[in-house]
Amino acid sequence: MTLSINCKDVGDPVCTHTMYGETEEELMENAKKHGIEVHGYTEESFEEEMAKNLENFRKVIKTT
Ligand SMILES: [Zn+2]
């Protein structure tokens, strides 16, 4: 089973990058890397944002 999430589904208006992970932890890790590399987050600001939006984030996770 692969978990995936699309940047667009978590509110980015232009980025359609899809992140994948075997587990939710791995998915979060990959999302964090993407957030830092592409969207200018720092580790702290990303985790802060993630903590606030965890419910929404979980809702848009797709499993395939
Ligand atoms: Zn993105």
Image (spheres, grey):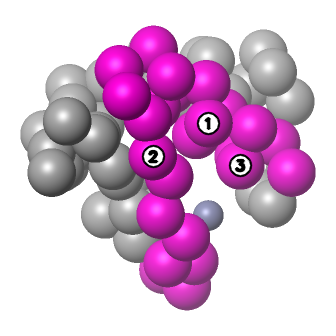
Residue wearing tag 1 = 30
Callout 2 crowding tier (Cα within 10 Å): few <14, some 14–19, many ≥20:
many
Residue range in magenta is 13-37
Q: Is residue 24 above or below residue 39?
A: above
Mark drawn on residue 45: none
Query: Is residue 12 in view from this perspective?
Result: no
Q: Is residue 38 left or right of residue 34?
A: right
Q: Specify which label sits upstream in the sequence, 3 or 2.
A: 2
Q: Is residue 30 left or right of residue 33?
A: left
Q: Is the CB of the residue bearing disc 3 within 8 angstroms of ligand 1? A: yes
Q: Is residue 61 left or right of residue 34?
A: left
Callout 3 crowding tier (Cα within 10 Å): few <14, some 14–19, many ≥20:
some
Residue wearing tag 3 = 34
Q: Is residue 26 magenta?
A: yes
Of residues 34 and 64, the one drawn nearer to the viewer in this rendering: 64
Position of residue 21 measured from the top left corner of the image (x, y, whole percent): 44, 35
Q: Give the residue type at disc 3.
A: His
Q: Specify which label sits upstream in the sequence, 1 or 2.
A: 2
Position of residue 47 measured from the top left corner of the image (x, y, whole percent): 62, 18
Q: Is residue 13 above or below residue 56?
A: below
Q: Are marks 1 and 3 in contact (CB under 8 Å)?
A: yes
